Image: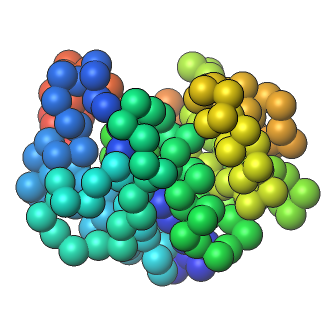
Amino acid sequence: MLNIPCVIFAGGRSSRMGEDKSLLPFGGFDTLTQFQLFRLNKIFKTVYISCKDKNKFDFNANFIEDVKSDKVFAPTTGFIAVFAKLHVEKFFAISVDAPFINKKEIEKIIEADTTTADATIAKTSFGIQPMCGVYHRCIEGKFIEMLKDNNHKLGFLLKSSNTTYVNFEDEKPFLNLNHPHEYTEALSLI
């Protein structure tokens, strides 16, 4: 099992899905979040769930509630809360809506990570996958500045940081469930 903590980000607005995707049933589980928690607990020693409000979930887990902001539904608030809660130098971030990223991809990213990187992130021909990678504590201040500036573009943060990109030929593991048709496709694949 991997020693680095894993954080599942499940605090988004899900506006493109039309309903909270973290609560959609998936893979025999009541929610996509439970599915992710179950499978990632087999890979990592510790798994946390970053969310706006843990009360939306009816199961026990290690929850980290976002920095309180009724207006900001962006990972920025989650990252700040994670750095405040976890006393570690780095953690692995994964989005709740990426249920096909497996141990093989995760290990490749972690193996490519170095102590001099601010972040180590997956990249496919579609582009960077900012919600799949290792984030180091040295980048915490940039997240705080982004929140102050109301700038929530992770791509901007990664371009202005010492980011290592890990290339993946196969894009299938990085399927994100943003729209109803992607959720339907994922249900057929599981």
Left or right: where does residue 66 sit relative to residue 181?
right
Q: Is residue 81 above or below residue 132?
A: below
Q: Position of residue 51 (x, y in %)?
A: 36, 52
Left or right: where does residue 189 sit relative to residue 68?
left
Spot the residue most to the right.
116
- Which one is nearer the viewer's eye here, 95 or 63? 63
Q: How is the image coloured?
A: rainbow
- Which one is nearer the viewer's eye here, 23 or 36? 23
Q: Residue at x 18, y 22 (%)?
A: 18
Q: Quadrant of residue 15?
A: top left
Q: Quadrant of residue 41?
A: bottom left
Q: Position of residue 148 (x, y in %)?
A: 66, 35
Q: Residue at x 83, y 31 (%)?
A: 160
- Which one is nearer the viewer's eye here, 108 or 133? 133
Q: Do we see residue 69 in this rendering?
A: yes
Q: Quadrant of residue 88?
A: bottom right
Q: Residue at x 60, y 65 (%)?
A: 84
Q: Residue at x 31, y 32 (%)?
A: 13
